[in-house]
Image: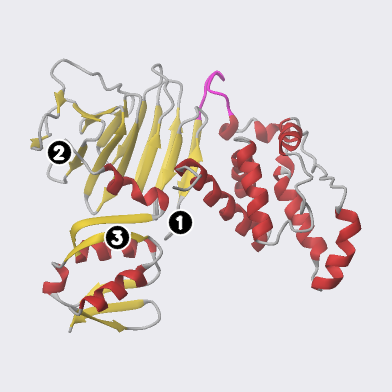
Amino acid sequence: MSKYNQANIHIIEEASHWAMLLDDGDLNEKQKKEFTHWLLKGPVHLDEFLQACAIFDVLSDIDPNKDISIDSLLANISKSDGNILTIHSNKINSEKTTKNERRGKNITARISLAMAATIVISIFTFSQLNSPLFINEDTPNLQLKNDYTTALGEQRSVTLADGSIVYLNTLTNIEIDYTEQFRNIYLYQGEAIFKVAHDPNKPFRVWVNGTMFQALGTEFNVRNNQGTIELTVITGEVALTNNAVKNQDLAIKDDSIRLQKNTNIDFTSDKTLIVSIGQQATVQSNGIVKTEVKADLDKKTSWKVREMMFKNDRLDEVIYEFNRYNTLQITIDSPSLSRMSITGVFETNDPLSLLKFLESSGKAKIQRDGPNKIIICDV
């Protein structure tokens, strides 16, 4: 069993992402702001970032012997007045010249870039630290509006002003609209996990088209999937309705519907459906809600660790999932193969593993049709 839990793995992945961005070049202002907020979450974030940079050879000349104190850096970051802070390591100056000559690279520019990143990219200005991303939830007239989008294969997490965390899957677009009364999230495309900070005075609601989900102290996954909307509750409870208006608090009444068994519910009424931990509700375009009282949480949330879990799923559904994450697009040129049952766990960015599996089965033939297109055919 690995010594790292899932939370640590996620931080390591995020640290690697930022290290790669810094290695590629300067961050834009929006990225700097997000990176600053990410580093300020705690010492483990900065520690993992330093280690990731060492792996990418960005900080090999800055902190090779772990001489820099993470805690002191964070303390300096929190009180920065907007200036770049200086990293001091006793052994940098004596070793830098020899290393530069041996490697024959322009290290000066890269060290400056890494310094700016490691010391939180200057923390910008005091006024930026008081921008909506950093507003305390007790600030009067709290409002937060931001759009976040992920590209093909990209995943990211966003910590909101109230401490709630949103994990965005590939090809996802959300809008955050916090007001004095409500915490509204609009999911326009894709999939996200919402880990909601408790605040009974400000309901947390996720909107997908005309459907609204209100958290009742919970963590839940929502996916806008080919005309259907899937809700899976990881912890707590979520109230669901198709008839809410923007400024309406979703009241929990005695006649609210609670799931007792797998069923289909005609959800055109004004009643509220309560979905509890481990349950799933799929809202279809015709207003019918298909429910499961024992959803497969591991399968539904495996994307968070960049995996896809299939259990007797049709091949065409499996291919659809792979195509969500990869530039390599796969099509099936066989109705019988489309119905083929697939069980297994695959990495989201490794479609070739599926193709090798299909070839080894002796039931399918793989044909390449251009650099980014694969066709699966009958043998």
Residue located 42% across and 47% down the image: 168
Estimate how packed mark 2 is, as few (under 14), some (14 to 19) or many (20 or more) residues with alpha carbons within 10 Å. many
Please say if the residues under marks 3 and 2 sit with CB atoms less than 8 Å apart.
no
**Element type at marker 3?**
helix
Amino acid type, mark 2: Thr
Q: CA distance from mark 3 to mark 1?
A: 14 Å
As for residue 139 lying within the magenta part, the answer is yes
Q: Position of residue 22 (x, y in %)?
A: 66, 57
Residue located 83% across and 66% down the image: 99
Amino acid type, mark 3: Glu
Residue located 35% across and 24% down the image: 217
Please say if the residues under marks 1 and 2 sit with CB atoms less than 8 Å apart.
no
The residue that disc 3 covers is 321
Q: Position of residue 279 (x, y in %)?
A: 21, 35
Position of residue 90 in the picture relative to residue 41 (left or right): right
Q: Tell me the magenta residue range.
A: 135-143
Q: Position of residue 221 (x, y in %)?
A: 32, 40
Q: Position of residue 167 (x, y in %)?
A: 43, 43
Q: Earlier in the sequence, mark 3 or mark 2?
A: 2
- Nearest to the observer: residue 328 or residue 314: 314
Up the image or down, 276 lies above or below 370; here it is: above
Amino acid type, mark 1: Glu
The residue that disc 2 covers is 291
Type of secondary structure dominating the magenta stretch: loop
* Number of numbered discs overlaid on the protein picture: 3
The residue that disc 1 covers is 154
Position of the C terminus, as image quadrant, is bottom left
Can you see residue 27? no
Q: CA distance from mark 1 to mark 2?
A: 29 Å
Residue located 20% across and 66% down the image: 315
Q: CA distance from mark 3 to mark 2?
A: 22 Å
Name of the residue lying farthest toward the right: 94
